[in-house]
Image (tube, coloured by chain):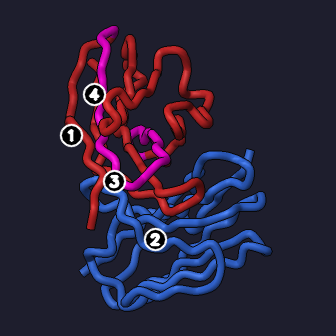
Chain colours: A red, B blue
Amino acid sequence: EPEVTQTPSHQVTQMGQEVILRCVPISNHLYFYWYRQILGQKVEFLVSFYNNEISEKSEIFDDQFSVERPDGSNFTLKIRSTKLEDSAMYFCATARADSSPLHFGNGTRLTVT
Amino acid sequence: GIQVEQSPPDLILQEGANSTLRCNFSDSVNNLQWFHQNPWGQLINLFYIPSGTKQNGRLSATTVATERYSLLYISSSQTTDSGVYFCAVHVSGTYKYIFGTGTRLKVLA
């Protein structure tokens, strides 16, 4: 079964540094999402992306965050200047169509020190 | 915004027992998924169930969209069923799924 691939699986960074999290979607999927899960808490929506544009974003997704699909395959989440509270598991999800089932990657655990 | 509440928040079972997990949502939804988050943090897709009933082995799910709830049934539980179970709803008129509060299940041998 096709999978969503996320890299890296773990990343440790210092406060104030930029990080880029990468996701390779399932090949025929057109809708892309980023979610965040702080340890022990629920999974929170960050942003949805379709046709090279943001479709919707949450209040969490402020100016420090950005997404793009630079080469038609990878889908990336950039955090410009990380804060301690950005420490979390970040999940990429993709779907064939809007409201179709989400398929999740295994996540990137980000630790900001 | 929509509220998605799951109950119970925590559940401890002996191996072999049956259980029912509930997901209530406060507004109209297009679709609903159930996920199992295993101890390694992976989100495993269990069911895509906007309405009706589906079964997959020892698991089954029922969604009654008009009454704004879904149920996940686990029969003959095994230790490997341990983890957190989330429902996620696709909110009508939006471009996102919203996750519920989760049920943390522990199955004892």
Task: Judge by depth and name the residue closer to the eye, B100 or B78.
Answer: B100
Looking at the image, residue B76 lies above or below residue B4? below
Q: Secondary structure at mark 4?
A: strand
Residue B43 appears in which quarter of the rendering? bottom left
Residue ID for mark 4: A111
Looking at the rendered structure, the kind of residue marked 2 is: Leu
Q: Quadrant of the C terminus of chain B?
A: bottom left
Rendered location of residue B82, percent (x, y): 33, 70
Residue ID for mark 3: A26
Residue ID for mark 1: A9
Question: Which of marks 1 and 4 precedes in the sequence?
Answer: 1
Q: CA distance from mark 2 to mark 1?
A: 30 Å
Question: Which of marks 3 and 1 precedes in the sequence?
Answer: 1
Looking at the rendered structure, the kind of residue marked 1 is: Ser
Q: CA distance from mark 4 to mark 1?
A: 11 Å
Taking the spot 35% from the left edge, 84% from the top edge, the residue there is B77
Task: Judge by depth and name the residue closer to the eye, A28 or B83.
Answer: A28
Closer mark to the observer between disc 1 and disc 3: 3
Relative side of B102 to A68, left or right: right
Q: Which residues are magenta?
A: A16-40
Looking at the rendered structure, the kind of residue marked 3 is: Ile
Q: How many marks?
A: 4
Relative side of A28 to A17, left or right: right
Same chain, marks 1 and 3?
yes
Tags 3 and 4 in contact by the CB under 8 Å rule?
no
The crowding category of the residue bearing disc 3, from other C-alpha atoms within 10 Å (few below 14, some 14 to 19, many at least 20), is many
Residue ID for mark 2: B11
